[in-house]
Image (cartoon, rainbow, N blue to C red):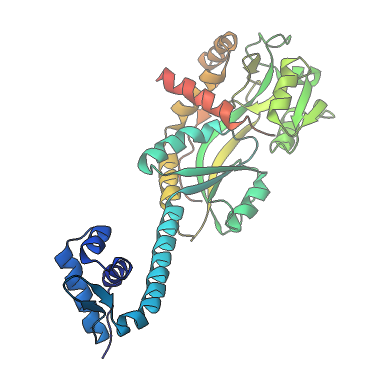
Amino acid sequence: MSMQLQFYQVRYFLALARTLNFTRAAEQCNVTQPALTKAVQKLEQELGGALIHRERHLTQLTELGKMVLPTLEKIFAAAEAVRLQARGYQKKTIAPLKIGLVPSVSAALVTELLLEVARIIPDLRVDLREADANGLIAMLLDGEINAALVGDAVELPERIDRWRLFEERYVLVLSLKHPMARQTVIPLKDLHEVEFLERVGCDVAGRFKQACFADQPGPKVVHRSDQESHLQEMASAGFGAILAPEHAPRLPSLAAIPIEGDPVRREVQFLAVAGRQYSPALDAFIKVARVRDWTTALDKLRCASAPASSNVNVRKVDAQGAGSLFQITGPGPASSRPSLSQASTVVAKVARSR
């Protein structure tokens, strides 16, 4: 004959064993005294003997009760541990969302997405990682991150699913005091005069050289850094110009000037591992990213980070038919950036502009 012990019966008995008082035990278990008495009686039936010796003014454990008490305590402790582990795992599957970004993709691109996901999943916790594209792909396959935003200058393994988010152009970012800062567009022939500040590991450096310096030695690079903040400070001081995505937040002392013909463009892609079960947070993030109006969102982000003196220049270029700043390529499976605090400031400006 099989024994069927109920968790609540064990809990009620252990409370009674501690207090030796039905009233106090019922209060501790937040049940009525008759309910507690009935549960203990059912437990006694399952074990085949009395566990409690009841007298008018005295309640004692029977010999059987004393014998099974240590074992029932262990059973209860083990069951409680399992329950807590399960609760922690459930929270863990919902909460952590680990997103990888290449240095040229600003955190400002994902902060608004994360705010939308947080409305769906209130307990959302986010871990933003930064690495080059190959490093992020390795982290994806190893399970260190859930998803990544990268440019299109990378070969993807078959195990990686890809969603195309948008296309954007690269511009020259330079000091407002730079001689070229008042130009509406930088002619290709003038690029050989520009002194460049290069981000180490720039994923479009080769594309830029091929498109703009095919018959020349290449861009004149005077300084390098792997930190965007360093490059922006140096550009602000007049040391040179940065080739950067137009969406990227920048210092108020810097202007972003388009290059003639937009010779350098890149597609930003969202990556996740194919066939892997998505957590609720990742599933929500993918859905929000795929339905997002990136043209409007990135245009607002660009305007929020641009100084007023350079907005006129950019709008003139648009009016002259230079093309959309950002092009939606359609969803379908298929350097350093500013700090998160800087990105959050830009997002706040965007929110106020709505």
Looking at the image, residue 326 lies above or below residue 103: above
Q: Position of residue 101 (x, y in %)?
A: 60, 41
**Total marks drawn?**
0
Is 160 situated left or right of 178 in this image?
Answer: left
How far from the left and from the top, in percent, is residue 316? 55, 11
Q: Is residue 59 above or below residue 303?
A: below
Q: Is residue 191 visible?
A: yes
Name the quadrant containing residue 102. top right
Instruction: State the image coordinates of residue 109 (x, y, percent, origin top left).
Output: 52, 33
Give the camera-side residue of 324 and 270. 270
Which residue occupies 73% across, 9% down? Answer: 179
Examine the rendered structure and indicate whether residue 90 appears above or below residue 292: below
Which residue is painted at 69% across and 26% down in the image? Answer: 229
In the displayed orientation, state which residue is furthest to the bottom. 1
Residue 2's image quarter? Answer: bottom left
Q: Is residue 12 left or right of residue 331?
A: left
Location of the C terminus (image quadrant):
top left
- Decide which of 59, 310 is in the foreground and name it: 59
Asked if residue 291 can be seen in this view, the reply is no
Q: Position of residue 145 (x, y in %)?
A: 57, 51
Image-based side of 194 in relation to 267, left or right: right
Please determine whether, in this image, residue 93 is positioned above or below residue 66: above
Q: Check the image and name the residue furthest to the front.
A: 57
